[in-house]
Image (cartoon, rainbow, N blue to C red):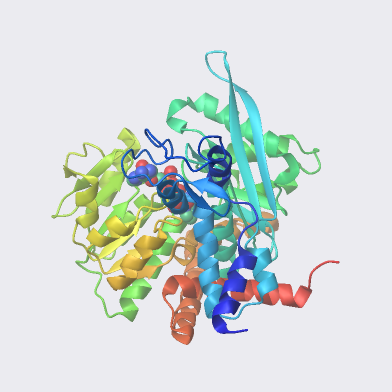
Amino acid sequence: MNEMNRKRRNRQEITPVSKSREWKLLYYEHGRPGLEDGSEYRGLCRYCELRETCALPRPEGGVWRCENYIAMVREVSLYEKVVKQLEEAVDVVHFDRDICKILAATMNELIVHFPVKMDDGGIKMLTGYRVQHNNALGPYKGGLRFHHSVDIDEVRALATLMTWKSAITNIPFGGAKGGIQLDPAEFSTRELEKITRRFTFALGNNIGPEYDIPAPDVNTNPQIMAWILDTYMSTMTPNERNRCIHVVTGKPIESGGSQGRHKATGQGIIFLIEKWAEDHGFNLKGATYIVQGFGNVGSWAARLMKKNGSKLIAVEDVTGAISNSEGIDSDDLANYVKDKGGVLDYPKAQPIDHETFFSTKADIFIPCALENQITAETAEILDVKLVAEGANSPTDPRGDVVLQRKKIDVIPDILCNSGGVIVSYFEWLQNKRSEFWDLEEVDHKLYKKIIDAYERVHDTADKFRVNWRTAAYIAAISRLEMVYKERGIFP
Ligand code: NAD
């Protein structure tokens, strides 16, 4: 079989069985009468919203499709993107095709619909998700996100990234992710507590300290982890109650959390930026940086970066963007955001728009918000030397191509933000052993683990002459492939 056919066969076989929700919708909606006969479509296209230029409908594989809509859908399907990155690694290294088929699929997918009584006495139905991607290396592990964008496709993708993250950092966890589709700003604290507890109850034994261990992610925090722990414990027998404190990580310290967990993801990013600077003979003192997202990850990264004498010159969050070429004090901004809920109207900086934020000339960009922020368009105007991906999947495939063309270095997400899961592992270990490590010990162990992973990715990139994202995937998949080969497939 020639090389081209081998790659094609590999790709076909590891394509995920179930496509995103949008793909199914596309199939059914386009099968409606009037379009299938190929007659010219008149009026506003309901899929891509283009009246004049829409090439609808066109037959493809027996289904009539709007090409513009296909392009849009293909861009937003995060899970497809993650599988595509897996395929790229598979194309470079001749990984076992059967094992890659396993890794391209998720193991379990749970969708729960549950009622919660609101403050006004009314009932609201909510939808929650938990996807368990793989547990070959250890219990499923991954965050819970409260956001209106949460859906099965997003959760699948993020669960898969967690598997790579655990593999790359050599920790004995698999990958999972979950969340509830909601906007937390629309609920009172009391309602959020009820939602969290009811969701935990609905998940039941699908999570557990030795089976699947959630942690904080976007819009969730130590308080939410404490509610999950308390609810989970309450469903146990008295004998088991104190044996399940490690059912979640990222807890408040008093409830069994670890020193250093809250800042861990930001701390990991800074250790890696420092290592990158050392390797490139780059002086961080006086270097400039911009940060997108000023929540847990972004604010800690910004604050810890300050210790290197670097200057924060622009920040964007969901409320808006600000800049100050003289520098923004990250601690002061963190206090402001805690008080006001966002960076908007911060008095010691000027407001700027989204485009100006992305075109701000700086040495380092640390995206710490959501997925797909670095697109072909924003990558084109980025004027930085390094992108340190604090967020999960902040770069879309076309953005990635532009970053490579512009020779901007990238520390990829599955390495860059792995500090969170590393210290979650430390928290889990401390809970199991009834130990309490001090901050110095946690930071020291985090540094060692994350720099080990950096070296592994570095060596892999050199060995296969690939970019760091592909190298990170290769390093992660190599470990999983080895484990599957050693153990075989039951029965
Ligand atoms: P968070 O909820 O604490 O903060 C999210 C931030 O993103 C907020 O400042 C919000 O305003 C901003 N944001 C949201 N939408 C935005 C938009 N459209 N444009 C600009 N800014 C926007 O969440 P977090 O825990 O800091 O997570 C941030 C990212 O890091 C996510 O991708 C998450 O998956 C990833 N991550 C988090 C952890 C962790 O330990 N919390 C670990 C690994 C990866």
Q: Give me the residue at 66% from left, 77% from top.
A: 96
- The answer to whether residue 391 of the structure is visible from this angle is yes
- The answer to whether residue 438 of the structure is visible from this angle is no
Q: Give me the residue at 61% from left, 41% from top.
A: 129
Q: Note whether 247 is above or below 32 in the view shown.
A: below
Q: Note whether 218 is above or below 60 in the view shown.
A: above
Residue farthest toward the top in the current orientation of the protein: 121
Asked whether, in this view, residue 168 is left or right of residue 343, the answer is right
Q: Give me the residue at 23% from left, 59% from top.
A: 381
Residue farthest toward the right in the current orientation of the protein: 491
Q: Position of residue 225 (x, y in %)?
A: 57, 42
Q: Position of residue 39 (x, y in %)?
A: 46, 40
Q: Note whether 176 is above or below 451 in the view shown.
A: above
Asked whether, in this view, residue 5 is left or right of residue 39, the answer is right
**Residue 342 vs residue 320, the one in the foreground:** 320
Q: Position of residue 464 (x, y in %)?
A: 48, 84
**Residue 313 image-quadrant placement:** bottom left
**Residue 482 image-quadrant placement:** bottom right
Q: Identify the image quadrant of the C terminus.
A: bottom right
Residue farthest toward the bottom in the current orientation of the protein: 463
